[in-house]
Image (cartoon, helix red, strand yellow):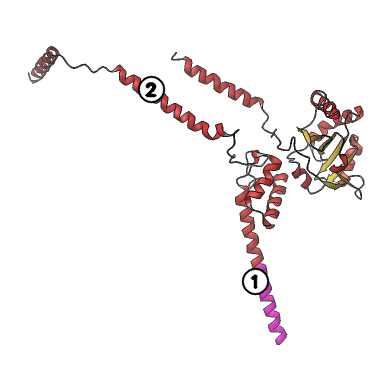
Amino acid sequence: MRYLIPLIIFLGLLAFLAIGLGRDPHEVPSPLVNKPAPQFQLAQLHNPDKKFSADQMRGKVWLLNVWASWCVSCREEHPYLLQLSRTRKVPIYGLDWKDQREDGIGWLSELGNPYVLCVSDLDGRVAIDYGVYGAPESYLIDKNGVIRFKQIGPFDADTIEKKLIPLVEKLNQE
Amino acid sequence: MKYLLLGILLALSLSFLTAAQESNDAELDERVRVFSQQLRCLVCQNETLADSQAMLAMDLKQQIREQMKAGKSDKEILAYLTARYGDFVLYRPPMKRQTLLLWFGPFILLALGFCILFRYIKGRRDQIHEEPLSVEDHHRAVELLRSESGKEIA
């Protein structure tokens, strides 16, 4: 009994620490999940004269991916996005975040373009509206324009297959 | 001469104007700095927004500055930030159902500590039996004391 109580306290502490170690402090839960995606209207990356707004995507399930040519993890994510775009399961739209237009275009022509189209967010205002704090980040938006899932950090094959695609299929049926 | 005077007057008034502008800016800078000290930078999480030089932190400070200039209150700006980044940006978490344990947990632990301490002290006190000295023992003690002091003197 004398040793039991400290042991229990110690084990409890150990459990808390173990859970804490397993968590990624950089994954800050977004308050925007299950809220309407913020509206924006931005110039397209390849056709700066043309605008694109989130409104245009009403009635479709789509993925908004925040990337930049200066972003290292985006390079890591890129092959998976290319793969995803080839499956044609969900249209991917890109938001080129605080990037020079030429750099963004150059990056895409070098690595391949998985996006239906990209917009450039030169001053980063739209990214702030979406609560972006580090690229890449992706938002899965449903037919009613509500954010249903946010991916923080790069996608990998596993997350795309086990999380994203099943969710896309579910949202398509809604 | 008239033009010279006019010119001097104009220059003076202009310098007053810019001085007023500058002090206004310094005030605003200070307000942004103090305000952003209570906010967490999301890029380098153990730094305040005020201290952080990260790109996003600079952008957010710029936004805060603009909103302050537009006459928004601190409360409105905090609401703007938490709507986008969640309560995580606040170093002082708001009191909510999810944060009750965070706010009151330490006090519960303190009360628990006092309970344990109280029980421990009480347990020790119960171990001490107060038994009055019997008359025989008293005599023996007096006898012993007497003989001890007698020895010392001798």
**Label 1: how many Cα within 10 Å (few below 14, some 14–19, many 20+):** few
Q: Nearer the viewer, residue B99 or B60?
A: B99
Magenta run includes residue B7: yes
Identify the secondary structure beneath mark 2: helix
* Badge 2 or badge 1: first in the primary sequence: 1
* Residue B134 in the figure: left or right of residue A75: left
Q: Name the residue under label 2.
A: B119
Q: Mark 1 lies on which chain?
A: B
Would you place residue B79 above or below residue A151 in this image? Answer: below
* Residue A18 in the figure: left or right of residue A40: left
Q: Which of B82 and A73 is in front in this view?
A: B82
- Magenta span covers which residues? B1-18
Q: Which residue is drawn at 79% across and 35% down?
A: A139
Magenta stretch prevailing secondary structure = helix
User: What label does residue B16 carry, if any?
Assistant: 1
Q: Nearer the viewer, residue B127 or B17?
A: B127
User: What label does residue B64 carry, if any?
Assistant: none
Residue A158, image x and y in percent?
A: 80, 23
Say yes or no: labels 2 and 1 on the same chain: yes
- How much space separates mark 2 and mark 1, taking CA atoms? 73 Å
Residue B132, image x and y in percent?
A: 18, 17
* Residue B19 in the figure: left or right of residue A172: left
Residue A16 seen in the current view: yes
Q: Residue at x 79, y 25 (%)?
A: A163
**Residue extending farthest bottom:** B1
Q: Mark 2 lies on which chain?
A: B
Residue depth check, mark 2 versus mark 1: number of the one nearer the observer: 2
